Image (cartoon, rainbow, N blue to C red):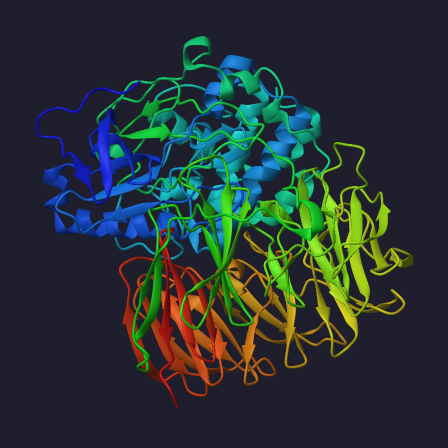
Amino acid sequence: MTDPLLPGDPATLGSVRLLGRLGAGGMGRVYLGRTTGGRLVAVKTVHAHLAAEPQFRERFRREAAAARAVTGAHTAAVLDADPASPVPWLATAYLPGVTLRGAVAAAGPLEVPVVRSLGAALAEALTSIHGAGLVHRDLKPSNVLVTAQGPRVIDFGIARALGDHGMTRAGDIIGTPGFIAPEQITDSGPVTAAADVFALGAVLAFAATGRNPFGDGTAAILLYRAVHEEPDLDDVPARIRGLVAGCLEKEPARRPSVGAVLERTADPGAALWWREEPLRSLISGDEEDRPRERTAVVPTKEVTAATVPAPRPDEPRVAPAAGPGRAERAERAERRRGLARRGALVAGGATLAGLFGVSVVRGWGDPGPGGTVNSSDGAQLDLRKGSAKPGALRWSLTSEPGGVDAFQLSGGTVLLHGPLTSGVDGYVRACAASDGARRWELTATDGAPGVWGVAEGILVAPDVGLPLVGLGSGKALGKADPFSSSPLRWISVVGGTLITAYQDDTDTKELRAVDLRTGASRWEQERPGTQPPTVLGDTMLLATALGGQVLGVDGASAGTLWSYEGLKDGGDQLLAAGALPDAGNFALLTTLGELHLVGARNGERVAVAADSYAVTPGATAVGAAGGTGLLATAGSLHGFDPDSAKPLWPPLATLGVETSWPRRTGGVRGPVTAGGLVLHWSKADTLQAVDPRTGEPRWTRRLTGIAKVPPVVTGGTVYAACGEVCTALRLTDGAVRRTWSLPGIIDGLAADASGWYGRIGTSAVRAYNGVGG
């Protein structure tokens, strides 16, 4: 599977010891390596003659940052990178699996329910990508990996920040013919998230038929067909043909948003098709016993449309995935009942098409007798103390790359999660925010948490296998684990009740409620297909995945309070919902851009605004600030009257929900508000403070780097992270108070009265003292 190192190959890169060669191409080489803690990684390097070009090295740096800016359940994450090294390199996890192209080649076209499930997963991935302010630009079957955890979108090597055109020469076409959108080919307009929707339609058509919707041929032929001819969808099953055809519209504005695709494909009760034969064997079987996709390693170079190189027969490329932009999430070890770890190599073009990971679901951790949980001493975190001076580094915790994949701050405690370097588990550690000292540490599952949080001093983290845990003590509350072993979908806290939703593939009720402080069961119900709820007081707004039913439900008793029937017939569906506490209303945004206001007490329609809000591709969320309703899409921030639903001010440009609206407990996002202002990233490097009553910017501050995380506010100070730099700004006028340069991309940010806390990639968490005053 690997070739030996040759004379002249580096023995180490950073802290990674190289074990052998995995592949090579026109851009550089890919090595198999091992970290000091024993984790296998794939390390992509750049050829010396390319690294000597300042423009290429700068692009490498940008693309490494772009790859790190993407997170989500169906995307991957970069572990480490050093664009400034004499040999620039980027490390991702070494993980087994099979590409979608390989899966279809081996098992045949997918059934309609599977294609729908695949579409939902890819739409979720694109939501994460677009929410980070990026467009993938090369979504295709060989950039979709089917793993034992489900599909993943990889290879962000040519991903680009929305609106960034600075590093590509005029006339260049980057992407894969047959999957490139017409506007990418003709350069007739900006390449937006809609281009990825076009590629998504082509991928779904391929998955359903086993062939490209624009047929076979040279790159030039496929490019011409994509611009001038209609796709051949005759073999696409009728049940999904309309969806695919909509995605493949020539005009970007006529394509559905990613959110609309997700609404039309989401089915939380769908089978886990990647765990069924024959895909299960393709993913987890011994490499010698299963088909192994191995395509030729073809040196490539960047070219214009007039100089397209000879393409591969199955998937011609116009230009390579320049640089090391493919992002792979840190390797997740198998759980206790997991499969043996095996590897598969896929190479193509100038890059490897994928290095994958295998995992299977494990049951929740046994809290043991007397309300205890298994403690962990396995996390290898190096604590270094700093200084008490204003603005100084207070403490740092450092691990090997991949050792810290999530953190949060609550009540003077910093919580860390990551996989252990040995064994099959992960950990959750609680540290004192004051000095970084460990308070407690528990064994958890190794997958990064998506919905964990703290409510009323209780850690709620069923997504990493923990029962309810007291934040101060690290002890389980109650004597039994209150959670189901079924796959978790979402959690929500309503008053003192914790509600969990599970994938309905067992005898477990789909919705389950427990007492937040004791874990005692309160109620169980079958309500299949519900989306994460919006909560106002004791009322939950519950809707099915397709928005066909909208209910008001009492969180304490599960009783139905009312049913809202006000959505249009003819395909209009609920896209997003939010609570408007000052008005006592729920706000419901539909896929047709209608905004409905519904009374939380009785479910009656208060108002509706039609044709007032353009739903753009990407993540969408509804919230409130200062008595004003807020609606954020991938590209616009709207303010609306919470009583009439009418717009209050013209929409403002915004980078995206995932970059500007932080995730709360349960995964629901909300705006950053302080001092009567709403703070958001208007561009990838520009922070803006807006008066929600008028929509007028109070101040705008351009910073250096690419924003990946929402700003945080404590007292009168705003902390904003752009790339490797964190800046403290005065809340009232945006004046810069101090900047800090860190040794890596800031992937997580939090703050309290003592200062701010940042996660650097997946290898460190640092605490800095506030600036004072």
Q: Is residue 595 visible?
A: no
Q: Nearer the viewer, residue 139 or 422?
A: 422
In the figure, 298 relative to 728: above or below? above
At horizontal 41% and vertical 68% (from top left) the residue drawn is: 757
Q: Which quadrant is the C terminus positioned in?
A: bottom left
At horizontal 62% and vertical 23% (from top left) the residue drawn is: 236
In the figure, 473 relative to 695: above or below? above
Residue 525: x percent and y percent? 85, 46
The picture quadrant where one finds residue 558 is bottom right
In the figure, 77 relative to 761: above or below? above
Q: Nearer the viewer, residue 756 or 644?
A: 756
Q: Is residue 62 visible?
A: yes
Indicate left or right for 542 with 250 as reference: right
Number of labels in the image equals 0
At horizontal 59% and vertical 23% (from top left) the residue drawn is: 208
Indicate left or right for 273 with 500 as reference: left
Report the residue that reaches farthest toward the bottom.
773
Report the residue that reaches farthest toward the top.
289
Q: Nearer the viewer, residue 466 or 265?
A: 466
At horizontal 65% and vertical 32% (from top left) the residue drawn is: 116
Residue 606: x percent and y percent? 83, 71
Q: Which quadrant is the N terminus positioned in?
A: top left
Residue 163: x percent and y percent? 38, 57
The picture quadrant where one finds residue 108 is top right
Residue 440: x percent and y percent? 52, 58
In the figure, 158 relative to 276: above or below? below
